[in-house]
Amino acid sequence: MSRLAIVTGGNRGIGLEVCRQLAMKDVQVILTCRNPEKGEEATEKLNAAGHAAVFHPLDVDDPESIKALFEHVEEKFGWLNILVNNAGIMLDPRETNGGAASSSLTASVETISNTFRTNTLGALQMCQLAIPLMKRAGFGRIVNVSSGMGQLSDMGGGYAAYRISKTALNAVTRIFAEENQGTNVLVNSVCPGWVRTDMGGPGAQRTVDQGAETITWAATLPDDGPTGGFFRDKKRIDW
Ligand code: NAP
């Protein structure tokens, strides 16, 4: 039986490409996103290319929406193999009037808390509901799409909300990986690199397929694959 995956933020950017790459590997994909029209459109394109994908609405900033998705998965399938926590936002102002990146001195608590709800708490709740279904299936792979901007060992200034949310997402990876040792549920963080998407902008170095490659790799690791790691280009990087 083919693997079953949920991808968050699957309507565009890296998430859409992860859906395509997983489908290419014979994974059944539940493409989720918050705008149903865009989700249906993206799913139809995958189907037209011969890929097994279905759409389900999901706003990771809404615990009820997360609950509704998992009620649907429980009822329709009763199990799950792969979760890619890809949905993410960067709300920090890109530049101040002086042209420098947003300063932490002026970062608003509202921006930090909104970013945290989507990038960190949404992913955490997804893990909480996905893991029991993965254990039932005897196979689970969770990929938290993080960023070098959340890497403590290479922490720069500015973009406080985004950086903090991704550092905390890495903590979510470590905690769930640790608690699920020996269960064949492997939990890892991946930095896709700087990718040409709406978030990455046109000046980014990588294409979406390059950005999605390591995420897809971590989502389809063999049973003896790593857990609790942080990866870029399929190589372990420092936290
Ligand atoms: P993107 O093009 O801006 O796409 C972001 C995706 O997240 C969209 O599908 C968006 O949906 C979705 N999303 C945002 N808030 C959501 C919510 N509350 N519920 C459900 N979906 C939500 O960004 P991207 O570049 O593909 O980024 C994907 C991931 O890679 C993010 O986690 C990002 O932090 C990470 N990343 C990106 C880069 C880069 O250079 N691009 C580098 C490092 C890490 P809507 O269409 O509804 O807004």
Image (cartoon, rainbow, N blue to C red):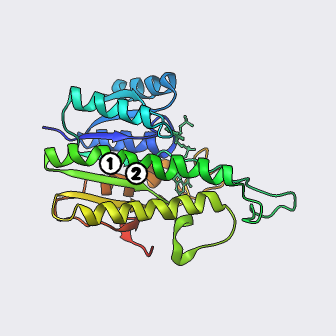
Q: Marks 2 and 1: in contact by CB < 8 Å?
A: yes
Q: Quadrant of the N terminus?
A: top left
What residue lies at 39% left-to-right and 45% top-to-bottom?
18
- Please say if 82 is above or below 149: above
- Please say if 221 is above or below 199: below
Between 27 and 171, which is closer to the camera in this rendering? 171
Q: Quadrant of the C terminus?
A: bottom left
Identify the amino acid type marked 1. Answer: Gln
What residue lies at 19% left-to-right and 38% top-to-bottom?
79
Determine which quarter of the picture holds residue 53: top left
Q: Which residue is mark 1?
A: 128
- Please say if 84 is above or below 165: above
Task: Evaluate whether residue 129 shows in this view.
Answer: yes
Identify the amino acid type marked 2. Answer: Leu
Q: How far from the left and from the top, in percent, is residue 170?
A: 43, 63
- Please say if 192 is above or below 238: above
Badge 2 marks a residue whose secondary structure is helix
Q: Is residue 137 left or right of residue 172?
A: left
Q: How far from the left and from the top, in percent, is residue 29?
A: 31, 35
Q: How far from the left and from the top, in percent, is residue 130?
A: 29, 44
